[in-house]
């Protein structure tokens, strides 16, 4: 018997297509409206249908050391508490530009209860973190040579405060379970894993059996964490505390470690510790990818002055995810660097300002310095 073809009126087909298109568009819109969302929300995204190509792009940013010397926290004291927000006010528009921004929290945020202090054993008011969040920082690295300045207590206190504030942190941990938790920030369906390691802790040994407290550079440990991050994220970002203080060019050791990390799958390396800026470069990997490295981001805020120690900046890089029927592909492009300068008057009124505008804050050579720094940072790019 011949089957009779069922005829569906054209109008019903058109209505169905229109509804499907509306649902699809709405899902795309709601994904864009969320600033941060967990990996589960990825399921909200429309499944790839084999015919369309999807492209998402975000901008990642980083600033260097947040190193709070006593004059800086004394300046932030308003008689009742600590307010660091004014320090960041002039650069807030710059800091808000990247979709995700990371900073290196160099001095311990142990809080007043543990006794505030400066060099050589730093401990800062915890309200520094509130100002960072307010300025647009999304995650801080805490693996650096000052991580044990207040011992285990400092790490517990800092970690608890950041958790309560909701500011993700990576590189020092209260316990092994926390260390095992990958820090992955998700934006527009692009998953960015953050990892952080330091060369050491100023000779203060890690208590036996508590190696989880601070991530110390070790190729074997890093290799396995990178592999774990790679299988859970689209992009792996490494914050590294390394190099020689006050040197404007990276050491051979920094280059070797960077090449190792690049080959292992790290996509972006944000370096810190030298307190001065070291250039950016693209590093070729043995599997034909390229890794973006910025060897040192300098001091973003500190009480140090002169000899390039009061110049820092914001590095950004675009991350594009292309989904085609061949699979998904990540592209890094457009690295930029915007220099900043820390101004103060007799140890008061600390402000981070764009270096391009620093003449208005008393730096007469601002224009020449700006040109010099732009050249210094980009000289190895191409
Ligand atoms: Zn350091």
Image (cartoon, rainbow, N blue to C red):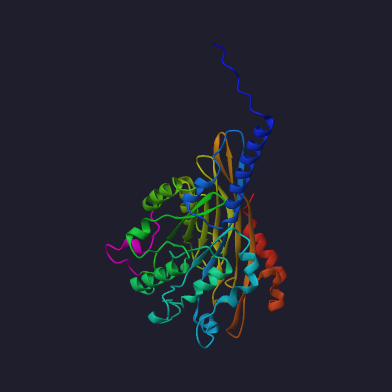
**Which residue lies at the image location 50% right of the left edge and 71% below the top edge?**
129
Q: Quadrant of the N terminus?
A: top right
How far from the left and from the top, in percent, is residue 357? Answer: 70, 72
Per the image, is 329 magenta? no
**Residues drawn in magenta:** 204-218
Note whether 239 is above or below 7 in the view shown.
Answer: below
Observer able to see residue 220: yes
- Residue 297, above or below 43: below
The residue sitting at the bottom extreme is: 79
Residue 276 as seen in the image, left or right of residue 257: right
In this rendering, the answer to whether 180 lies above or below 66 is above
The residue that appears at 67% across and 60% down in the rendered structure is 375
All told, the count of numbered labels is 0
- Residue at left offset 54%, top offset 70%: 132
Query: Which SS does the magenta portion mostly show?
Result: loop
71 versus 315 height, above or below: below
- Classify residue 51 as left or right of residue 106: right
- Reply yes or no: does residue 210 show up in magenta: yes
Query: Residue 291: horizontal and vertical position, in percent?
Result: 54, 49
Residue reaching furthest to the top:
1
């Amino acid at each position: 018997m011949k089957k009779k073809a069922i005829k569906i009126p054209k109008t019903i087909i058109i209505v169905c297509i229109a509804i499907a298109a509306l649902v699809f568009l709405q899902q795309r819109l709601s994904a864009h409206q969320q600033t941060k969302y967990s990996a589960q929300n990825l399921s909200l995204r429309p499944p790839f249908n084999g015919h369309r190509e999807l492209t998402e792009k975000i901008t990642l940013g980083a600033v260097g050391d947040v190193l709070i010397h006593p004059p800086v926290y004394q300046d932030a004291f308003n008689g009742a508490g600590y307010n660091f927000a004014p320090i960041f006010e002039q650069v807030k528009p710059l800091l808000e530009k990247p979709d995700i921004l990371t900073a290196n929290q160099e001095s311990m945020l142990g809080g007043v209860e543990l006794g505030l202090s400066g060099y050589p054993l730093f401990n800062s008011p915890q309200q520094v973190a509130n100002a960072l969040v307010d300025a647009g920082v999304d995650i801080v690295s805490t693996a650096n040579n000052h991580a044990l300045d207040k011992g285990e207590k400092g790490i517990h206190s800092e970690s608890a405060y950041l958790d309560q504030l909701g500011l993700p942190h990576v590189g020092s941990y209260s316990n092994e379970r926390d260390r095992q938790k990958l820090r992955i920030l998700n934006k527009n369906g692009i998953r960015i894993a953050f990892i952080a390691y330091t060369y050491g802790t100023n000779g203060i040994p890690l208590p036996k059996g508590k190696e989880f407290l601070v991530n110390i550079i070790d190729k074997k440990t890093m290799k396995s964490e990178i592999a774990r991050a790679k299988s859970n994220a689209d992009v792996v970002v490494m914050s590294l505390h390394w190099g020689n203080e006050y040197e404007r060019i990276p050491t051979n050791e920094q280059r070797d470690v960077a090449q190792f990390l690049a080959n292992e799958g790290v996509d972006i390396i944000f370096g810190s510790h030298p307190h001065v800026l070291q250039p950016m470069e693209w590093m070729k990997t043995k599997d034909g990818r390229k890794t973006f490295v910025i060897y040192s981001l300098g001091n973003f805020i500190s009480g140090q002055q002169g000899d390039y120690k009061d110049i820092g900046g914001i590095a950004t890089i675009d991350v594009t995810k292309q989904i085609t029927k061949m699979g998904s592909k990540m592209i890094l492009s457009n690295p930029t660097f915007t220099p900043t300068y820390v101004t103060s008057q007799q140890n008061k009124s600390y402000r981070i300002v764009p270096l391009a505008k620093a003449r208005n804050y008393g730096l007469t050579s601002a224009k020449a310095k700006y040109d010099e720094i732009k050249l210094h940072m980009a000289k190895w790019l191409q």
